[in-house]
Amino acid sequence: MALLAAKLLMFLSVISGKPGSAAALDNCVFLGEEEKNSLYEDGDVVVGGLFPLHYSPVSSVAAYRAKPTPTMYNFSSRALRWMQTMTFAIKEINQRSDLLPQIKLGFHIRDSCDDIPVSLRAALLLVNGQPESVSGDESLGKHNGSNLGCAAINRTVSSVIIGDAASGVSMALLRSLGSFHIPLVSYFASCSCLSNQKEFPTFMRTMPSDTFQVRALARLVSYFSWTWVGVIGVESDYARFAIQLFLQESVQYGVCAAYTYFYPVVLSQHALDELLDVIQMSSSKVIINFSSESEMQRILREVQRRNISGLQWIASEAWATAKSLWEKSADLLKGTLGFAIRRAAVIPGLKQHLTCLSPSHIHESAFLAEFWEETFKCRLNGSVNSHSHGVGSYLDRPLCEGTEDLSDVYSPYSDVTQLRVSYNVYKAVYLVAHALQDMSNCKVGKGPFLHGTCADPKSFKPWQLIHYMKRANFSALGEKINFDQNGDPIAYYDLLNWQKRPDGSLHLVKVGFYDASMLAGRSLVINDSAIQWPVGKQAFRSVCSDSCPPGSRIVRRKGEPICCYDCVPCAEGEVSNMTDSLECLRCSEDTWPNNERNLCIPKTIEYLSYHEFMGILLCVASLLGACLSISIIATFYTYKDTPLVRANNMELSFLLLVFLVVCFLVGLLFIGKPSDWLCRIRYPAFGISFALCISCLLAKTAVVLMAFRATLPGSNVMKWFGAKQQRASVLLGTAVQVIICLIWLLTSPPHATSNTHYHSATIIIECVTGSEVGFWCVLGYIGILACMCFVMAFLARKLPDNFNEAKFITFSMLIFFAVWVTFIPVYVSTAGKYTVAVHIFAVLASAFGLLFCIFAPKCYILMLKPEKNSKKHIMQR
């Protein structure tokens, strides 16, 4: 392993394949003496650690310089806190009697500089167990035989590494260390790509996968109805995989990306201009940014320079708690929402461990010395940290007095109010410890390896440790810690809101949480009232198209995202009772949409009722006609012995009046709610009653004609047309109609039905004829009788004598024809209660025509001109 590590170290710059990598490596690694440039404590098992104690605002990977200046890297106090948390956790475990009592844990920590070549070199040194030589030439070039370890101090090999912070760096380490099967436990790498156990079988992490963060973000924007969001991210594995997942996840919540933009790690002015142009041109005011703190600083400076306001920033967990961004961009970041990894309320003893530093202790490591000098802006005697900043500026600093106290100044290093990544580091150390404890508890013959063997906790293979780590299940600070099949912890995020205190400082307020272990509908909990928004008291509206209200549906715009659409009112007979409905639902046959078209209401039921004005009017007309007919019967009965009544075929007159009463009352059968039995009565009653009336008139006319023919010499016609024959002719004329009606009722009788087709919003309850042939046969037969009656009356209209009523029958038939000829087209062209009204009107009009034309003149003489009611007057020509 040592030889392979040496060869890898020698060709490290070639592995990176990027200009400037070796120079960047020199710049970051050789900040001081090699013994002081790492932190080491011996033990039975040495845990390696990689922390980005230095970072470059401008990536060294893209810095195409032959020899980059030492000022490229800045010191990270926050990463130093992570490192110190690891040492604290290891010391805490070593002091416990219930966890690894027979094993002492050690640590070997190196700086990864948030840079792939540096991280690779540091990791190989950890697994090799030897530090670099003091001379860079020896470490990179003189690796021949015995010279390899001349200036080195032998150290225990690290069988497990806790690190690194960045996803891209972790991927590079895993690909390089894969052949060694060295377990790598990351505390901050969240890329979902690392969950691939086939590609990265030795990887675990205490940081949730971005898969869960993306689900939480999709639920968040959906919760506030932000369907039109901008998504940006740095050109890295972390952002690429996260944005890809977000775009896939957000589809099910109806969320669309107004734009998706990747910007380079090195944010030149041109790249910034392109990014800000995209943001300004978009109608979306909500921006999700997958980046780290350093890229966000550059973006915020440009936003401030352009004076862009009114943006709702959604922070990824990488910068959701980056308080340093607040100092110069407080107004821009007010109201920011972001998911941060779970915060530990307190890690007992950590605060004291962090703040117990003094000048006498910090010389143990160049990391601690540089932190001390950067915090108090002084320089220590014998310090070798001038490479981290300009030599001139460093020498201008005063010497440290030795009385400096960390409690007198604020530093991210000593800030334990937001222990999130530090808590992940703490859990990572305990994961290793519990895996070693499980290894120690193994009983020979029952072990997990070949033939039931166990591993020696003080001398084990790295792949044996990863076996126990993936099955670890323990508690840390009261929280149950377990992992899924991909080596990922169960995700829990705090939803943080960046709020501005009265004094202008930042207050990270927890306004909700996301728990992936809960059901989908309950996984996200938000306290809306606790949120401080960028502007006003409500969230921004960020939609491509306004929501379609109930009563309308969505119509997609061709060639545009699904969030961009038009709202189209539901078609006639359809409703939608939801906002943003994709389709309208058709109402049932007995219901109809209301005016808003968001609810199906019962249709209006229509029929000619006794309670409406038209029904009342027709009912009164029917009763009036019946009463008039009865009164005429009474009058005729009173004057039955007078010449006028006797001369006009009294028996047929009485029959005709009785049948007219029936005709008037038949009109009442057409009023009211139709039913099957009522429909079966009304049409035959109408047909038979009119057949009776016309048959009587036909008989009366025939009697007139026969009477005059009987006066001719030798004529005996009247003996064939006496009273019995007249009754028989009426019955015969009616019998044909009765037969037609019986055939109609037996074959396809009339019945009641609900008509929903003529008027969409109305149910017309009506009688349908059943057989159209039957109905028109009934009308046709009445028409035939009427034509015969009219012809005979017309022929007899000029016969002598005053008792001749043929001319009155002629007039009545003319009225009858006028009524029913008009009735037919009107009847066919109307529907519902108006059809019934037309039918009743035709019945009443024809009945009144018969009544008035035939009997009004007689009543006039009987009531007002009694002197004309004499045999002499009637016989007068």
Image (cartoon, rainbow, N blue to C red):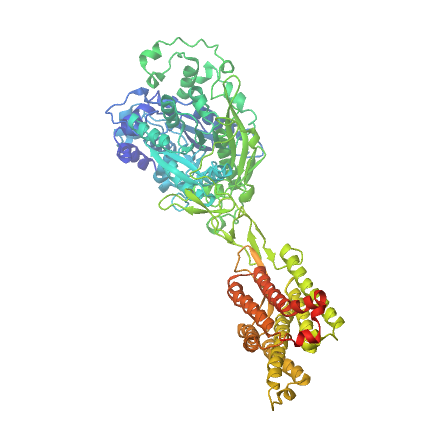
Question: In screen coordinates, is 153 left or right of 777?
Answer: left
Q: Quadrant of the C terminus?
A: bottom right
Residue 655: percent from the left, percent from the top? Answer: 69, 75
Residue 524: percent from the left, percent from the top? Answer: 54, 38
Q: Examine the rendered structure and indicate whether residue 602 appears above or below residue 639.
A: above
Residue 333: percent from the left, percent from the top? Answer: 45, 25
Q: Quadrant of the N terminus?
A: top left
Question: In screen coordinates, is 73 left or right of 440?
Answer: left
Q: Is residue 729 visible?
A: yes
Tally of numbered discs = 0
**Camera-nearest residue between 740 and 706:** 706
Question: In screen coordinates, is 584 left or right of 604?
Answer: left
Q: Is residue 173 visible?
A: no
Which residue is located at x 35 percent, y 40 percent? 175
Q: Examine the rendered structure and indicate whether residue 47 appears above or below residue 731.
A: above
**Camera-nearest residue between 24 and 441:** 24
Image quadrant in which you'd find residue 486: top left
Residue 463: percent from the left, percent from the top? Answer: 43, 43
Task: Determine the residue located farthest toward the right in the rendered image.
Answer: 638
Task: Determine the residue located farthest toward the left in the rendered image.
Answer: 66
Question: In screen coordinates, is 95 left or right of 110?
Answer: right
Image quadrant in which you'd find residue 684: bottom right
**Camera-nearest residue between 246 and 44:** 246
